[in-house]
Amino acid sequence: MIGATCWLIPDGYLPLAGDSTYRGHDCLCLLNAGHVPVQVWIDLFFEDRDPVEGLPVQLAARRCRHLRLDDPGALGGFVLPRQAPYALMVRSSLPIVVQYSRLDTTQANMSFLSVMGFPVQQPGGGEVP
């Protein structure tokens, strides 16, 4: 199977929407290259408040899914606050691949970043459930 069952993104930050045609946003990109649907859970960690854990996402077999984190529907109704640092832990029932992107439109010269998540394994090679 391709991927891992636990991924970390330590630097989340939903920017202001901006005045551009493009709205500033964060995006979580999930890939299930396997032949079986996968259950995914998203945990959010903040500097100044308790974590929000276990936000469920379904990921079909042999599909990708792009979750715009400024859309509460992507997070089961949870509204991610803008301009608040956060981190993500993405857990899944089977191995997947996770990527994170941010579009910042607060300036005329927009900025875009995209990074792969960090796959986590327990000591001894076992993955975190």
Image: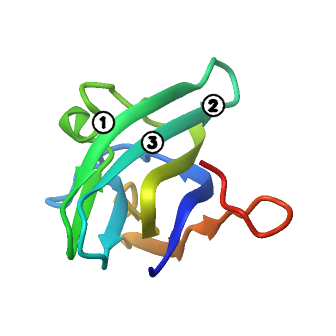
Badge 3 is on which residue?
42
Of badges 3 and 1, the one in the foreground is: 3
22 with respect to 75 (left or right) = left
Amino acid of disc 1? Leu
Mark number displayed over residue 46: 2
Name the residue located 28 percent from the left edge and 44 percent from the top edge: 57
Amino acid of disc 2? Phe
Q: Quadrant of the N terminus?
A: bottom left
Badge 1 is on which residue?
75
Of badges 3 and 2, the one in the foreground is: 3
Q: Tell me how far mark 3 sits from mark 1, CA to CA.
A: 8 Å
Q: Is residue 110 above or below residue 71?
A: below
Pointer 3 with pointer 1, Cβ within 8 A: yes
Residue 102: image location, x then y, percent: 42, 62
Residue 54: image location, x then y, percent: 45, 31
Pointer 1 with pointer 2, Cβ within 8 A: no
- Tell me if residue 5 can be seen: yes
54 with respect to 72 (left or right) = right
> Which image quadrant is residue 104 in?
bottom left
Looking at marks 3 and 1 on the same chain, the residue that comes earlier in the sequence is marked by 3
| Disc 3: CA contacts within 10 A as few (<14), some (14-19) or many (>=20) | some
- Tell me if residue 84 can be seen: no
Q: Tell me how far mark 1 sits from mark 2, CA to CA.
A: 16 Å
Looking at marks 1 and 2 on the same chain, the residue that comes earlier in the sequence is marked by 2
| Disc 2: CA contacts within 10 A as few (<14), some (14-19) or many (>=20) | some
Name the residue located 38 percent from the left edge and 33 percent from the top edge: 55
> Which image quadrant is residue 125 in?
bottom right
Name the residue located 70 percent from the left edge and 29 percent from the top edge: 47
Q: Tell me how far mark 3 sits from mark 2, CA to CA.
A: 13 Å
Name the residue located 84 percent from the left edge and 66 percent from the top edge: 124
